[in-house]
Image (tube, grey):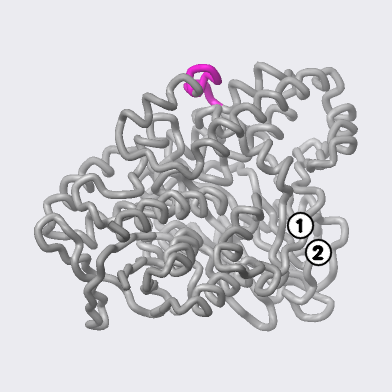
């Protein structure tokens, strides 16, 4: 039996390991932290459950497939709950917009907020459906290993004007600024600036429309636990608390994986779900390929980081939906500050997550749990003292939520903590604290992204946000499908 090692137990690593184990390849996952999940970590504090994220589950069929590979059912391990509306968008002037795939309700929202754009929205739907078919259905699970594969995809990219940004394309269909923001903000959920991310990412609208938006009962951590349970039932091995320090090579092949605790083992193939820069710069230290590619990666554009406030509080809040987007007074200018200028602006937009509206078990009786997420520049652009700034920004964010929803928020909070860019860097070895790896611009997509199989070390593979197709649960699960196909074929030769 061939043996494979997967470094990192994030969604991408778990999905890849399940596919390999289902194919009869003895697979070991090695995870540095005390719990699996990677960015989907979980904390339990004072009776509250706080998921680190991600909190939006789309394309559940891509997850279900991981179970059906071995004749299992996802429902045995995980219960997915539909979220409706998907998001409630709210602007500072009090206008709100409920975003969903209920076409009647959605058109009603457009008629209320931007009635002149109903026809334009219909046209945008057609565009989103086309790029979804080309960019996700046809290419979302296909590895781009050489430039020829990019040339092959070029006609579709040209046809759909992939060089334009999502915001630019949306603006060509609708005139209302609020509707433009409503139809373009999704790229922020995968680390992209709506003003510069390729218009191909308009496919997210179609992805959500067809598959819905879901929540795992018990929290995102229960989806992680379900994947682990499936993997271990299949005979896979999970090693927690084992920080990988080296991928050893013999000649041009990966040979062994070594951890900080002294564990060292030989494998036929190695796949890394770790941060892309960390994999090449740190795990392949003293290997020419590692140094060479790390220098290239350092020249690329990396996605921003995040500042997340987790808090539990007294009371129930039926008027606050599961997902809210609280837009600030600026859109383009705020994005430029975060992505280009690297400053911490006074204003911000907030993604507010309220899981206890769907699952009250995540908080003590009569209480609610939340997290508030704000995109911020990564440490390479914003090298500030987060120990000092963190508490200040935390209070400003809670003040804004109090202003919009809960006037006595500070009196009601029973537990709170925040997670800042240095935490992404230290806990996840994320380069410069980037939360989504490489920024998803056109020149860093598909072949221009990390390859699912390394170009020089033929039995070293990549999976996760830094590889094609990119960040987000469907993205990293899709990368696992692409990488697994290569590994299974190579190991059977």
| Element on which disc 1 rests | loop
Residue 491: image quadrant is bottom left
Residue 413, compared with residue 164, is above or below; it is below
Element under label 2?
A: helix
Which quadrant: the N terminus?
Answer: bottom left
Task: Give the x, y percent position of residue 317.
Answer: 84, 63
Whether residue 273 is situated above or below residue 112 in the rendered picture: below
Q: Is residue 405 visible?
A: yes
In the foreground, 463 or 177: 463
Q: Is residue 355 above or below residue 441?
A: below
Residues packed near mark 1 inside 10 Å, few (<14), some (14 to 19) or many (20 plus): many
* Residue position for label 2: 357
Q: Any magenta on residue 164?
A: yes
In this view, the residue farthest toward the front is: 493
The answer to whether marks 2 and 1 mark residues whose Cβ atoms lie closer than 8 Å is yes
Few, some or many residues within 10 Å of mark 2 (<14, 14–19, 20+):
many
* Residue located 58% across and 46% down the image: 189
Determine if the magenta segment contains residue 127. Answer: no
State which quadrant residue 146 falls in: top left
Q: Earlier in the sequence, mark 2 or mark 1?
A: 1
Query: In the drawing, does residue 356 fall left or right of residue 62?
Result: right
Q: Which residue is mark 1?
A: 322
- Magenta span: 157-165
**438 or 318, which is in the foreground?**
438
Q: Which mark is residue 18?
A: none
Residue 493 in the image, given as x and y percentages of width and height: 28, 57
Determine whether, in the image, residue 129 is placed left or right of residue 145: right
Please name the residue shown 57% across and 38% down the image: 137
Q: Is residue 275 visible?
A: no
Q: Alpha carbon of mark 2 to alpha carbon of mark 1: how far?
A: 6 Å
Q: Position of residue 213 (x, y in %)?
A: 72, 51
């Amino acid at each position: 039996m061939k043996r494979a090692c997967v470094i990192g137990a994030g969604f991408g690593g778990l999905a890849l390991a399940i596919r390999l184990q289902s194919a009869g390849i003895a697979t070991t996952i090695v995870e540095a932290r005390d719990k699996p999940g990677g960015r989907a970590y979980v904390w339990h504090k004072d009776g509250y459950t706080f998921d680190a994220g991600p909190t939006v589950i789309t394309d559940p069929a891509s997850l279900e497939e991981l179970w059906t590979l071995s004749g299992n059912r996802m429902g045995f391990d995980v219960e997915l709950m539909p979220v409706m509306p998907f998001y409630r968008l709210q602007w500072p002037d009090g206008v709100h917009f409920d975003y969903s795939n209920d076409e009647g309700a959605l058109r009603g929202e457009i008629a209320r907020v931007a009635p002149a754009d109903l026809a334009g929205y219909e046209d945008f739907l057609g565009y989103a459906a086309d790029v979804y078919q080309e960019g996700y259905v046809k290419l979302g699970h296909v590895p781009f290993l050489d430039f020829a594969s990019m040339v092959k995809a070029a006609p579709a990219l040209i046809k759909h004007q992939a060089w334009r940004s999502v915001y630019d394309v949306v603006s060509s269909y609708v005139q209302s600024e609020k509707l433009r923001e409503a139809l373009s903000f999704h790229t922020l959920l995968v680390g992209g600036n709506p003003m510069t991310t390729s218009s191909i990412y308009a496919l997210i609208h179609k992805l959500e429309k067809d598959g819905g938006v879901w929540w795992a009962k018990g929290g995102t951590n229960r989806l992680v636990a379900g994947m682990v349970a499936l993997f271990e039932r299949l005979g896979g091995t999970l090693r927690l608390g084992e920080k990988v320090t080296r991928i050893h090579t013999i000649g041009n092949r990966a040979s062994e994986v070594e951890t900080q605790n002294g564990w060292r083992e030989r494998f036929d193939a190695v796949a890394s779900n770790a941060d892309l820069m960390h994999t090449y710069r740190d795990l392949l230290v003293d290997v020419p390929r590692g140094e060479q590619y790390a220098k290239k990666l350092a020249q690329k554009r990396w996605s921003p980081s995040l500042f997340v406030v987790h808090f539990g509080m007294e009371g129930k809040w039926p008027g606050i939906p599961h997902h809210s987007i609280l837009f600030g007074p600026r859109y383009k200018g705020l994005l430029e500050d975060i992505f280009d200028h690297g400053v911490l602006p006074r204003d911000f937009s907030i993604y507010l997550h309220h899981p206890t509206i769907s699952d009250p078990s995540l908080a003590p009786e009569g209480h609610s749990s939340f997290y508030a997420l704000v995109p911020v520049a990564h440490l390479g652009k914003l090298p500030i003292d987060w120990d000092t700034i963190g508490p200040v920004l935390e209070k400003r964010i809670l003040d804004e939520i109090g202003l919009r929803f809960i006037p006595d928020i500070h009196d009601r909070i029973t537990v709170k903590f925040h997670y800042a860019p240095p935490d992404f860097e230290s806990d996840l070895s994320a380069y410069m604290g980037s939360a989504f790896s490489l920024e998803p611009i056109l020149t860093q997509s598909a072949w221009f992204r990390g390859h699912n199989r390394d170009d020089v070390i033929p039995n070293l593979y990549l999976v996760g946000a830094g590889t094609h197709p990119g960040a987000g649960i469907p993205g990293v699960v899709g990368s696992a499908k692409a990488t697994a196909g290569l590994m299974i074929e190579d190991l059977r030769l």
